[in-house]
Each structure stands twice: as C-alpha cells, then as structure tokens.
Image (spheres, rainbow, N blue to C red):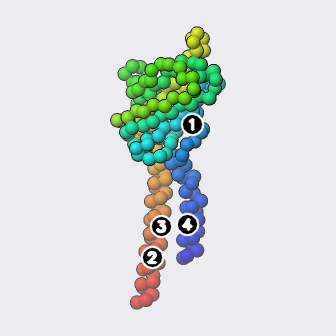
Amino acid sequence: MRSSLLALALLCATLAPVTSRAAGWHYYDPECPIALGAKSMKFVAMQPKKNIDRVCDALGDVGPTVIALDAPDSELREMTWDIRVIGDPKGDGIGSDAPGDIVYQLPVEKHRNGMVNFDFPFHTAGKYVLLAKLTSDDGKTEYVGRHPFTVGLMDTAETSAYLLFGAFALVVGGGFGFYYWKKKAAAA
C-alpha cells in the first residue's frame, strides 16, 4: 500500500510543473511574441491586485490589468505606435478594429525606449486581441501584429489541471480511507 502511494506521489510531483505551466501559472516568460512581419515585440500582462503571475494569453479574472510591450529592435523604436485592445467575439484571434469593437486605445505616438505599459480595468470576461500597428514616418513601412488573449475565462489546460488535482485528491483520500477502514476491520 505504501509503495503504491509513494509511486502515485512521485508521478504527481513529476507532472505538477508541466501541468502548472500549461495552466498559465508561470512567471515572466520572455517568449510571448507578437509577430510583426519579420520583426517582433514581446507582450506580457498581469493583474497585480490579484496575484503576481505574468501571463501571455489567459488572464484569470476581470479587473485592473497592466499590459507591457517591449520592442528591442531599433527600427521599431523609430516608428509611430498605434496600440489597441479590441474585442474578439468570434474567438478567431483576429478581432475587428472597427470603432465599436475597440475596448481601449493608446495615443498614437513614438516610444523611443521601445517599451510601453498601460493599465486597463477589464470589466467583462471574454476574448480580446491586442492590435499593434507600427508605421514609419514616411508611411512606406508598416508592421501589424495581433496577440489574442482571454480575460476571466478558464481555458482547457486550466480545466485539465483542476481535474487532475481533483482526481489526485480523490485517489489519495480514497487510499487513506481504505487503509483506515482495513485497519479498523482488522482490529475488530
């Protein structure tokens, strides 16, 4: 009995880091790129009043949120940035940049340090897209990138993690219950 419980505990300890990463429970991950043609910028979001997790694609709850963008490429730093958060009701990761679908828009300007962060209080759970349009001064070069993310929705990886934890708790609880039941039956 003890060897079975030990094997189960070792299996769960082995799977826990993989499951937690899949569920979005990770700290700053530098690989959250927004593809801008041949270039890219990094995206990270967090809800500091809720927790310290920084995520790429799934914010756990509605509420105050900080979104940060980082473009290390010097060409991108010299461009005008048009950054918008738009609704994605179809869930296709594209969204619509029609005026009625724009949830938030930063002032169009250059960010010569290559970084921008902004606070936004999401009031509605749903699917969103961060739209980044970077344009050169002469208008000849434009890079457009979209980064889909969710706010306040549970994704399948998170659901799987909760189900795995529930199954683990059920098996361990059942094992302890069976052990004590056998012990009590043997004593009687």
Residue 74 is left or right of residue 97, and the answer is right
Crowd around label 1: few <14 · some 14–19 · many ≥20 (10 Å): some
Circle 3 is placed at which residue position? 171
Q: Nearer the viewer, residue 117 or 60?
A: 117
- Which image quadrant: the N terminus? bottom right
Farthest residue toward the bottom? Answer: 188
Q: Comparing marks 3 and 4, which lies closer to the viewer?
A: 4
Rounded to the nearest angstrom, the CA distance separating label 2 from label 4 is 17 Å
Q: Residue at 39% of width from left, 38% of height from top?
A: 64
Rounded to the nearest angstrom, the CA distance separating label 3 from label 1 is 36 Å
Q: Nearer the viewer, residue 130 or 138?
A: 138
**Mark 1 residue type:** Cys
Crowd around label 4: few <14 · some 14–19 · many ≥20 (10 Å): some
Query: Of marks 1 and 4, which one's residue comes earlier in the chain?
Result: 4
Tell me the tag on residue 9: 4
Q: Comparing marks 3 and 1, which lies closer to the viewer?
A: 1
- Which image quadrant: the C terminus? bottom left
Say what secondary structure mark 1 lies in: loop
- Residue 84 position within the rendered picture, expressed as x and y whole percent measured from the top left: 46, 25
Q: Is residue 48 above or below residue 20?
A: above
Q: Residue at 45% of width from left, 59% of height from top?
A: 166
